[in-house]
Amino acid sequence: MPQPRLREPSAARPHVTQGLLRPWPHALRLGVLERRGLRQHGHGIDGAPAAAYFYSPDRRGEHPESFLGGFGGILQADAYSGFGRLYEHGRQPGPIREAACWAHGRRNFFKLAVEEAPLAIEAVKRVDAILAIEREINGLTAGTRLAARAERSRPLVDDLESGLAITAAESDSGVA
């Protein structure tokens, strides 16, 4: 039976209503409103998709740890550091496996590519190609998406991983 898949579509961010015509009669407190969606459709799990919203007054990691304390499965999230301890091996009641976001992973490569780092430029091109494939297969069945990823995306990911590993090894040995 497939594991539950929890999707966090956007970073936990403060949300403030703009365009207030008059001041509030009391102090305005900013905080974090987090959306959690249990995405079941298309992942081999019966039932309707669901979303829950959790408020926290700041971005400390203890809040998602509290919200997701009893969850075990796959968490699709952005690069929010507050999720870090949720992915630790041996976490109880069970492990949470990170389904990382390509767009967020691409950001650091993009910053380096602007400085014309050859490996970063190549990494951005590969991630862009992966994202183009994802746009093409969006809305197709889970089996069709899986097959497309295995045939088209996997080689790009493998090449990217190999290139990064070679560069890291060269850097460690003082070659790069």
Image (cartoon, rainbow, N blue to C red):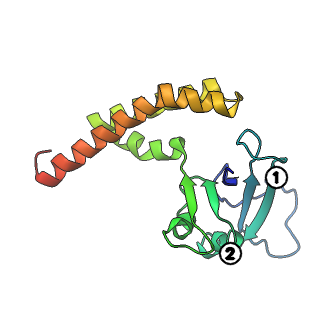
Q: Amino acid type of disc 2? A: Ser
Q: Is residue 5 left or right of residue 151?
A: right
Q: Which residue is mark 1?
A: 50
Q: Secondary structure at mark 2?
A: helix
Q: Quadrant of residue 29?
A: bottom right
| 1 and 2 marks in contact (CB < 8 Å) | no
Q: Is residue 123 left or right of residue 97?
A: left
Task: Name the residue located 48 percent from the left edge and 30 percent from the top edge.
Answer: 153
Q: Quadrant of residue 159?
A: top left
Residue 49 appears at what percent x and percent y?
A: 81, 48
* Label 2 CA crowd tier, 10 Å (few <14, some 14–19, many 20+): few
Front-most of 62 and 157? 157
> From the image, which quarter does the C terminus lie in?
top left
Residue 86 seen in render: yes
When the figure is inspected, residue 48 is found, relative to residue 34, above or below; the finding is above
Residue 165 appears at what percent x and percent y?
A: 27, 45
**Residue placed farthest to the front in the image?**
1
Residue 33 appears at what percent x and percent y?
A: 74, 62
The label shown at residue 66 is 2
Q: Amino acid type of disc 1? A: Ala
Which comes before the other along the chain, label 1 or label 2? 1
Q: How far apart are the two marked residues, 1 and 2, measured between alpha carbons?
A: 19 Å
Residue 115 seen in render: no
When the figure is inspected, residue 2 is found, relative to residue 116, above or below; the finding is below
Task: Name the residue located 73 percent from the left edge and 57 percent from the top edge.
Answer: 36
Q: Secondary structure at mark 1?
A: strand
Marks counted in the figure total 2
